[in-house]
Structures are given as C-alpha cells and as structure tokens.
Image: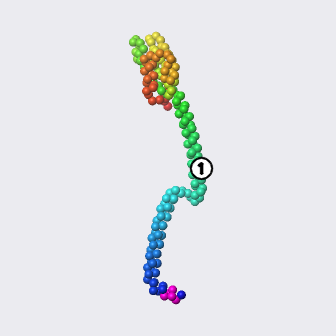
Amino acid sequence: MKSVLDQLSTQSSAIILTLFALVVGLLVAVFLLNRRVRELQGRWGRVFEGARGEHVEEMLNHHLRHHEEASKRLDELERRSALHEKTLKSTLRHVGLVRYDAFEEVGGAQSFALCVHDDEGNGVLMTSIVGRADCRVFCKPLLHGTSERTLSQEEQRALREARSEAPKTLISP
C-alpha cells in the first residue's frame, strides 16, 4: 500500500493535469448536452403546446381520432364529388343563342335559334320565327351534337356557339 501512495505522490502533477482535462472535457460535454436538451425542449414544446398536463398518449389518440374522422369526411366528399361530376355531364349547360330578323318587314332581331345540350351533345334546338302576324316555334332534338332534321343557318350557328363556349348555367343565382 505504501508503494501505491509513493507512486501517487511522485505522479501527482500528472494525475492532477489528467483530472483537470477530464473535468474540462466533462464540462464541455455537459454544456453541449444542455444546449441539445434546450433545442429538443423548444421543438417538443411547440408540438405539445397547450397540453395542460395531458398525457402524450391521450394527445396522440386524440390526433389519431381526428385524423380518422377527417379521412372519412374526405372519402365522403370524394364520393359526392364523383357523383356530382357524373351528374354534371348530363346537365344542359352548353348554350348557344342566335337572334336574327327572319323577315325584312319585322325588325328588332326578334326571331331566335336557341341550342341547349349536355357534355355529350344531347339536348334540343329551339327556333322561334316571328312574323308580322304570327310566331312559330320549332323544336329539334339533338343526339350527340347532331339532329335528324335539317338545320337552318341560324340553328347551325347556335349549335356552333354552344359547342365553342364553356359550360354555363341557364339561371344565375
């Protein structure tokens, strides 16, 4: 035992320097770890802000339930949106209107050709010819953008106008 004490006393300055370096190294490590803990507290503090003492597990379960509900609502909205898109294809939303003077003695462009069809070109072509003493109305069915009956120039223009324009509603809110 005495030999160990003699060794320690002769090597005391080296031992002290080694212990000092070890303490400095540990202080640096403590400083770096403290800084890392503060970063994590800041990051997790934002995540758990407003937790008011709740358990993390309860918070995660709440978020999972909320996510599941939102997912179900999104699925329902996607289903409804697909149904609406399907319905829109068959709505009469392509409109073309041409006003004209059918007879020289009647002015004011009171005669008209009105074309209304869906996305597939199914609908009607209505023509009203206004004369001095009478008014006649004709209706021709459209199937895939064509009619079995011969179309007048004005009806052809109304059909072209309905095809060229973006879909619109007949009645605005």
Disc 1 marks which residue? 65
Query: Looking at the image, which is closer to me, 116 or 122?
Result: 122
91 to the left or right of 24: right
Residue 24 part of the magenta segment: no
Q: Residue at x 45, y 14 (%)?
A: 130
The answer to whether residue 30 is above or below residue 146 is below
Residue 4 part of the magenta segment: yes
The answer to whether residue 35 is above or below residue 122 is below
Q: Residue at x 52, y 31 (%)?
A: 88
Q: Where does residue 62 sit, x and y in percent of width and height?
A: 59, 52
- Residue 24 seen in this snapshot: yes
Q: Residue at x 48, y 70 (%)?
A: 30
The answer to whether residue 9 is above or below residue 150 is below
Query: Looking at the image, which is closer to me, 11 or 44?
Result: 11
Count of numbered labels shown in the rendering:
1
Colouring convention used in this rendered image of the protein: rainbow
The answer to whether residue 68 is above or below residue 40 is above
Bounds of the magenta span? 2-6
Query: Looking at the image, which is closer to me, 115 or 82?
Result: 82
The answer to which image quadrant residue 162 occupies is top left
Disc 1, SS: helix
- Residue 54 seen in this snapshot: no
Secondary structure, magenta segment, majority class: helix
Q: Where does residue 52 sit, x and y in percent of width and height?
A: 56, 58
Q: Where does residue 16 sit, x and y in percent of width and height?
A: 45, 81
Q: Amino acid at mark 1?
A: Arg
How many residues crowd mark 1 within 10 Å: few (<14), some (14–19), many (20+)? few
